């Protein structure tokens, strides 16, 4: 089964994906994480990618399609992918379908997290990420403690695009380019809408029920 976690910036896609990966033995494919890895590696596109991310714009479809084809062509990931924050526009959604056919894959379900903007802003401004294990925390809602995290505190970081100015632009990009693709998936009966306002564990339970139903 291949899943898509869809939602605005800070909706909780990465948080829910991290939990699903463990229970359902999936691979998290976060294009945001893949792009941040490219920046760390300081490859030929790293400066361009960083500049686009820090401005809250989308990175080019060509860059994203190349990253996704690398994943799809790896048989280890077949039918075990959870896409987090991808696809991001209609062109990417359609390109995915072409690539998926080439590698005999398909999307089984799109889980769309709905969260109010004011809640999301606080979530983003409080976000902390462990650069070693990838776990996601929050100063306000889910702080790092000795019980929920084993890595050294020096690995806890903030994202460079988690500031008020970039958040505003990320929202604009989301409403203009990303939100319209929900129709594309609704028309294929793949869309499940989830109330993303509650506690992390309550949202997780709702997602779990949907996935378990699809598995039977
Ligand atoms: P990306 O990394 O995908 O960022 P995003 O979509 O803006 O989403 P976030 O990662 O900010 O939020 P999330 O939904 O994962 O929330 P999280 O679980 O962390 O993309 C970054 C940039 O890369 C883009 O702007 C673009 O430039 C580029 N990019 C990426 N993909 C691309 C693509 N396909 N095409 C082109 N460009 C692309 O949670 C947020 C916080 O809230 C955390 O602190 C968490 O602890 C907390 N939290 C989560 N759930 C709850 C809850 N239920 N209650 C309380 N707190 C919660
Ligand atoms: Mg994320």
Image (cartoon, rainbow, N blue to C red):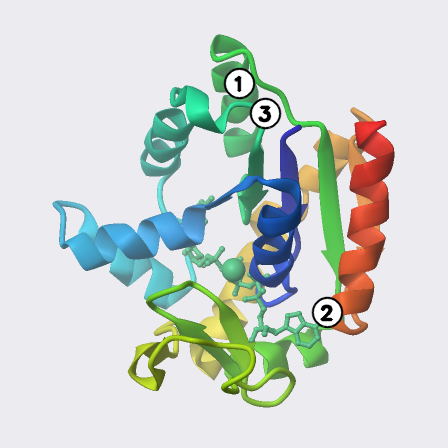
Drawn side of residue 92 relative to residue 79, left or right:
left
- Regarding residue 181, the answer to whether it shows in the image is yes
Drawn side of residue 5 relative to residue 64, left or right:
right
Q: Quadrant of residue 62?
A: top left
Q: Position of residue 165 (x, y in %)?
A: 45, 79
Q: Which residue is mark 2?
A: 200
Say which quadrant the N terminus sits in.
top right
Q: Is residue 162 above or below residue 100?
A: below
Q: Quadrant of residue 119?
A: bottom right
Is residue 176 or residue 131 the one in the foreground?
131
Looking at mark 2, is its residue's CB closer than 8 Å to ligand 1?
A: yes
Q: Position of residue 45 (x, y in %)?
A: 18, 46
Looking at mark 3, is its residue's CB closer than 8 Å to ligand 1?
A: no
CB under 8 Å between discs 2 and 3: no
Q: Residues within 10 Å of mark 3 (few under 14, many from 20)?
A: some
Which structural element holds mark 2?
A: helix
- Regarding residue 47, the answer to whether it shows in the image is no
Instruction: Residue at 64%, 64% (x, y): give it.
Output: 12
Is residue 25 or residue 94 the one in the foreground?
25
Q: Residue 79: which disc?
A: 3
Instruction: Residue at 43%, 76% (x, y): give it.
Output: 150
Of the residues tagged 1 and 2, which is closer to the observer? Answer: 2
Is residue 86 or residue 181 the one in the foreground?
86
Spatial CA distance of label 3 from label 1 is 11 Å
Instruction: Residue at 24%, 50% (x, y): give it.
Output: 38
Q: Earlier in the sequence, mark 1 or mark 2?
A: 1
Q: Which residue is mark 1?
A: 100
Q: Is residue 140 above or below residue 97?
A: below
């Amino acid at each position: 089964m291949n899943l898509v976690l869809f939602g605005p910036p800070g909706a909780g896609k990465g948080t829910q994906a991290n939990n699903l990966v463990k229970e359902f033995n999936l691979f998290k494919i976060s294009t945001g994480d893949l792009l941040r890895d490219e920046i760390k590696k300081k490859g030929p596109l790293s400066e361009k990618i960083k500049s686009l991310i820090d401005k809250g714009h989308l990175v080019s479809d060509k860059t994203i399609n190349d990253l996704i084809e690398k994943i799809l062509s790896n048989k280890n990931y077949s039918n075990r992918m959870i896409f987090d924050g991808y696809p991001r526009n209609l062109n990417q959604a359609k390109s995915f379908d072409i690539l998926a056919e080439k590698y005999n894959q398909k999307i089984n379900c799109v889980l769309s997290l709905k969260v109010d903007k004011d809640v999301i802003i606080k979530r983003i401004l409080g976000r902390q990420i462990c650069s070693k294990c990838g776990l996601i925390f929050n100063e306000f809602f889910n702080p790092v403690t000795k019980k929920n995290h084993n890595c050294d505190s020096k690995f806890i970081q903030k994202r460079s695009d988690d500031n008020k100015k970039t958040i505003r632009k990320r929202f604009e990009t989301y409403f203009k380019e990303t939100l319209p693709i929900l129709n594309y998936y609704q028309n294929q009966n793949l869309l499940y809408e989830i109330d993303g306002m509650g506690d992390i564990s309550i949202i997780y339970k709702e997602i779990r029920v949907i996935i378990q139903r699809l598995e039977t």
